[in-house]
Image (tube, rainbow, N blue to C red):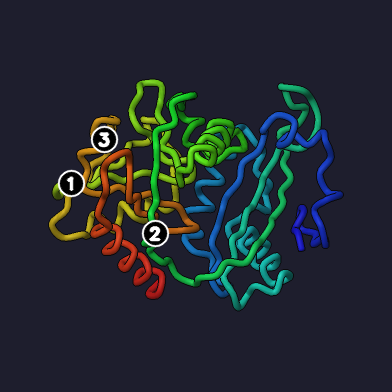
C-alpha cells in the first residue's frame, strides 16, 4: 500500500504523471526513515530537517504538516502494509505540484509514503569485507543545496555504477576543493589515534540525521575527541578506522581502501551505544 496525499492505494503505478516535477526537474525532497514496531526512530530530527529543507527550496509548507500529522500518516501507511509489528524502511517524498517549466506556477506540494520490510529491529555491525574507492569523475559543489536530501542525486548514481563495475561496496565523494565529503549513501567518519573526524556541513556533506546521533555519542565516548574538519584523500590511508553512517544501517565499517585495512573498534563501541540509546528512548 502506498500513501499518496493521505489516500492509501494498492500500487503507485498510476499515481504520478510524467509531468510530476520531481521526475521532470528533480524538484523534490525525501526522507528515509526506520520504523521499529511502530516507533519512528529519530523522528524529531527527520521532521525538522524536512521542514528546513522545504523552506530552503521555497516550497509552501501546508498548515496541516505538523509533526503529529506526518507521524500519523507514516504509521498509517506502515499499518496498512502490516508492518506495525516488524521493522520497516519508509521513504517519504515531497514534491512541488505540477505546473511550469524551470519556474513553477505554484509552490504548493504533494507527498507520498512508501514502505518496505527490513530484517533486523536493531542495528547490527557488518563484519564482512567492505571496500571503498574515491569517485573522481564528478565533484560535489559545497553549499546549502548539497546538504539537502533532494532528488538531485546524479553524482551518487554515477558513483554507484562506478562502484558496481569495479567491485567496490561503496565510493567516497570529493568536493570541488578535492577534499573527501561523504560516501554515496551516508556520512563519513575517520578515526586516527584518539581523534574522530567528520567533514563539516560547509564541505558539502549531507546534513545526516544519523550523523547528528553519532556525533552526540562520540562527545560522550571517553578518551576520544570529536573534530569537524576537512578530510584530505591522503588522510584515508593513514587512518585507523573509517565508517559510514545513515539511518538504515546505522554504522557501516569500511574494511579496505586501496592497500589499507582498517579496524572496527570504535564502530563496535558506537553501535552498541546507539542500540542502547534506542532501547531507552
Residue picked out by circle 3 = 229
Q: Is residue 252 above or below residue 208?
A: below
Distance between mark 3 and mark 2 Cα atoms? 29 Å
The residue tagged 2 is: 128
Q: Is residue 236 left or right of residue 186?
A: left
1 or 3: tag closer to the N-terminus: 1
In the image, taking residue 204 as reference, residue 11 lies left or right, namely right
Residue at 47% across / 56% down in the picture? Answer: 247
Image point (72%, 52%), residue name: 112
How far is the residue under mark 1 from the one under mark 3? 11 Å
Up the image or down, 104 lies above or below 211; here it is above
Q: How many marks?
A: 3
The quarter of the picture where the N terminus appears is: bottom right
- Looking at the rendered structure, the secondary structure element under dot 1 is strand
Name which quarter of the figure residue 268 lies in.
bottom left
Sequence order check: which comes first, mark 2 or mark 1?
A: 2
Crowdedness near tag 3: few (<14), some (14–19) or many (≥20) residues, C-alpha within 10 Å? some
* Mark 3 or mark 2: whose residue is earlier in sequence: 2
Which residue does the image show at 80% across and 53% down from the upper left? 12
Task: Determine contact: label 2, label 1, CB under 8 Å.
Answer: no
Spot occupied by residue 5 in the image (x, y as percentages of width and height): 76, 53
Which image quadrant: the C terminus? bottom left
Q: Which residue is mark 1?
A: 195
Amino acid at each position: 500500500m502506498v500513501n499518496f496525499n493521505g489516500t492509501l492505494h494498492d500500487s503507485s503505478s498510476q499515481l504520478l504523471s510524467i509531468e510530476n516535477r520531481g521526475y521532470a526537474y528533480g524538484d523534490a525532497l525525501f526522507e528515509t526513515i526506520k520504523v521499529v514496531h511502530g516507533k519512528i526512530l529519530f523522528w524529531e530530527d527527520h521532521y525538522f530537517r524536512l521542514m528546513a529543507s522545504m523552506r530552503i527550496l521555497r516550497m509552501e509548507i501546508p498548515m496541516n504538516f505538523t509533526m503529529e500529522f506526518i507521524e500519523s500518516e507514516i504509521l498509517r501507511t506502515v499499518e496498512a502494509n502490516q508492518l506495525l509489528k516488524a521493522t520497516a524502511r519508509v521513504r517519504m517524498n515531497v514534491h512541488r505540484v505540477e505546473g511550469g517549466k524551470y519556474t513553477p506556477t505554484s509552490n504548493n506540494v504533494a507527498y507520498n509514503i512508501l514502505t518496505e520490510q527490513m530484517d533486523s529491529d536493531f542495528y547490527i555491525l557488518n563484519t564482512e569485507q567492505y571496500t571503498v574507492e574515491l569517485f573522481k569523475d564528478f565533484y560535489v559543489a559545497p553549499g546549502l543545496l548539497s546538504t539537502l536530501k533532494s532528488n538531485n542525486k546524479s553524482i551518487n548514481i554515477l558513483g554507484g555504477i562506478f562502484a558496481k563495475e569495479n567491485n567496490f561496496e561503496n565510493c567516497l565523494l570529493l568536493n570541488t576543493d578535492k577534499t573527501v565529503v561523504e560516501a554515496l549513501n551516508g556520512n563519513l567518519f575517520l578515526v586516527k589515534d584518539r581523534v574522530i573526524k567528520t567533514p563539516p556541513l560547509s564541505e558539502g556533506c549531507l546534513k545526516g540525521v544519523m550523523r547528528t546521533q553519532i556525533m552526540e555519542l562520540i562527545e560522550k565516548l571517553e578518551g576520544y575527541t570529536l573534530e569537524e574538519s576537512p578530510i584530505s584523500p591522503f588522510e584515508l590511508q593513514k587512518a585507523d578506522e573509517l565508517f559510514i553512517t545513515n539511518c538504515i544501517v546505522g554504522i557501516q565499517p569500511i574494511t579496505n581502501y586501496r592497500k589499507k585495512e582498517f579496524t572496527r573498534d570504535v564502530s563496535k563501541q558506537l553501535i552498541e551505544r546507539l542500540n542502547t540509546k534506542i532501547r531507552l528512548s
